Amino acid sequence: FYGVGLEQLVPAVQSNNGGGVARAMVQMDTLYATHRAAVDKLVVLTNARIAKDETDAKGMIRDASLLMLVIMGVSLAAAVVVAVMVGRSIIVPLRHAVGVAQLVASGVLTSRIQVRYPDEPDQLLQALKEMNASLLRIVGEVRAGVDNIASASSQIAQGNDDLSARTERQASALEQTA
């Protein structure tokens, strides 16, 4: 198209050749029509490709969005499971510790306390276990002290009874002597 314009039309116009100009114009029109048809075909193909790419992109976006929703759902479910597990790992030992503390508060010092893990709730259980053992030892010592006091009181009472009996005998002997 451009080649004909430069090689035929321009020289024909410069030489005032009307027939050459007409032939060049017909040839250029034919070449232009072919060129225009090729451009139109290219535009149609490009538009089709753009439409296909747009459809593919929408599908990829839909698939990626669905995948993200699935991942978020799985992550949320995993987070809930982990939260429940962590909650139970804290709440169960704390409930056990509260139960032990309530038993100790009610005076039961014979409960068995098992410490399984080195975490904070089990450290609390360990402290309760040590407190329970200390209270049991203290109660034992107090009982032994009470038993000693009771024994001493009994001996003092017996000594008082003996003293009273001797005092009465001496008083009686004094009365007879008098």
Image: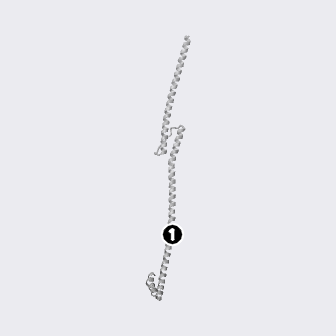
Nearest the viewer among 119 and 39 is 39
Label 1 neighbour load within 10 Å: few <14, some 14-19, many 20+: few
Q: Say which residue appears at 54% left-offset and 17% top-offset.
A: 167
**Considering only vertical position in the picture, is 123 above or below 169?**
below
Q: Is residue 112 visible?
A: no
Secondary structure beneath label 1: helix
Q: Quadrant of the C terminus?
A: top right
Residue, disc 1: 54
Q: Residue at x 49, y 32 (%)?
A: 141
In this view, the residue in front, 161 or 80, is: 80
What is the residue that sits farthest to the top in this orientation? 178
Residue 65 is situated, as x and y percent measured from the top left of the image, at 51, 63
Q: Position of residue 54 (x, y in %)?
A: 51, 69
Residue 118 percent across, percent down from the top left: 46, 45
In the displayed structure, 165 sits above or below 96; it is above
Q: Is residue 123 visible?
A: yes
Q: Residue 161: x percent and y percent?
A: 53, 21
Question: How many labels were placed on the picture?
Answer: 1
Q: In the image shown, does 47 or 56 lie closer to the viewer?
A: 47
Amino acid marked by disc 1: Glu
User: Is residue 110 positioned above or below 48 on the image?
Assistant: above
Specify the color scheme. one colour
**Residue at the (50%, 71%) spot, across then down:** 50
